[in-house]
Amino acid sequence: MQSYLESLDLWDAMEEDYELHPLPENPTITQIKNHKERKTKKAKARSCLFVGVSQMILTRIMTLKIPKEIWDYLKEEYERDERTRGMQVLNLMREFELQKMKESKMIKGYSYRLLDIANKVRLLGTKFADSRIVEKIMVTIPLRYEASITTLENTNDLSKITLSEVLHDLQAHEQQRLMRQDHIVEGAL
């Protein structure tokens, strides 16, 4: 949200809780323009905050009039303290470690599950290397991928192999296996 507001040049309306003073008598064009701009910035910032939250949260903040008040409320309500963040990371790491690809599943779905957990950990401010995902995939996928894993181990330095390389190789193996199964079914008919 902060990046979005900064890109629209509205962040200063959020950081500064400036008051809009009434225009003096016989204001200059510059004073009118500046007054209107500052007033509009607050309204735009408030509008962005309203649009950027769910309906449930909107009902809690819609009575707040000043963008800074809204921002402070959202920060207080949703910014996690260090202990809570640590517990969430721990739970996500446990979930990651318990993941195992089922025999009937596809590599794409399994890798998405692992990446989703890893990205949640990263969002909480903890480093999570792609190499851990690579190791997890190579250890927990079903035996039908054993040939691909052996090939990867024999042809690459496993400390330097990227997640995308592993996924591409395993998906290619999976597609070849599925095509062979289709030919077997067609031949049987």
Image: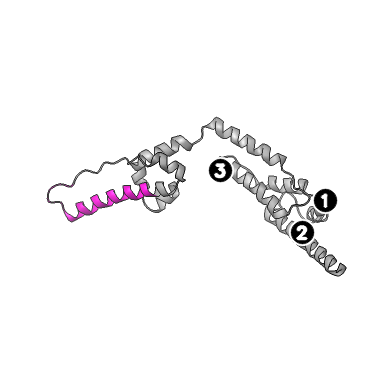
Q: Which of pointers 3 and 2 indicates the residue nearer the eye? A: 2
Q: Which mark is residue 130?
A: none
Kindly identify which residue carries mark 2: 174
CA neighbours of label 1 inside 10 A, class few (<14), some (14 to 19), many (20+):
few
Q: CA distance from mark 1 to mark 3?
A: 33 Å
Q: Which element is circle 3 on?
A: helix
Q: Which of pointers 1 and 3 indicates the residue nearer the eye? A: 1
CA neighbours of label 2 inside 10 A, class few (<14), some (14 to 19), many (20+):
some
Q: Which element is circle 1 on?
A: helix
Q: Amino acid at mark 2?
A: Glu
Kindly identify which residue carries mark 1: 143
Residue at x 27% of width, y 52% of height? 37
Q: Is residue 166 above or below residue 20?
A: below
- Residue extending farthest to the left is 26
Q: Give x and y (percent) for residue 179.
A: 79, 65
The answer to if 172 sits in the magenta stretch is: no
Q: Which mark is residue 123?
A: 3
State which tag comes first along the sequence, 3 or 2.
3
Q: Which element is circle 2 on?
A: helix
Q: CA distance from mark 1 to mark 2?
A: 12 Å
Q: Is residue 157 above or below residue 95?
A: below
Q: Amino acid at mark 1?
A: Leu
Write the start and end of the magenta stretch as one range.
23-47
Colour mode of the rendering:
one colour
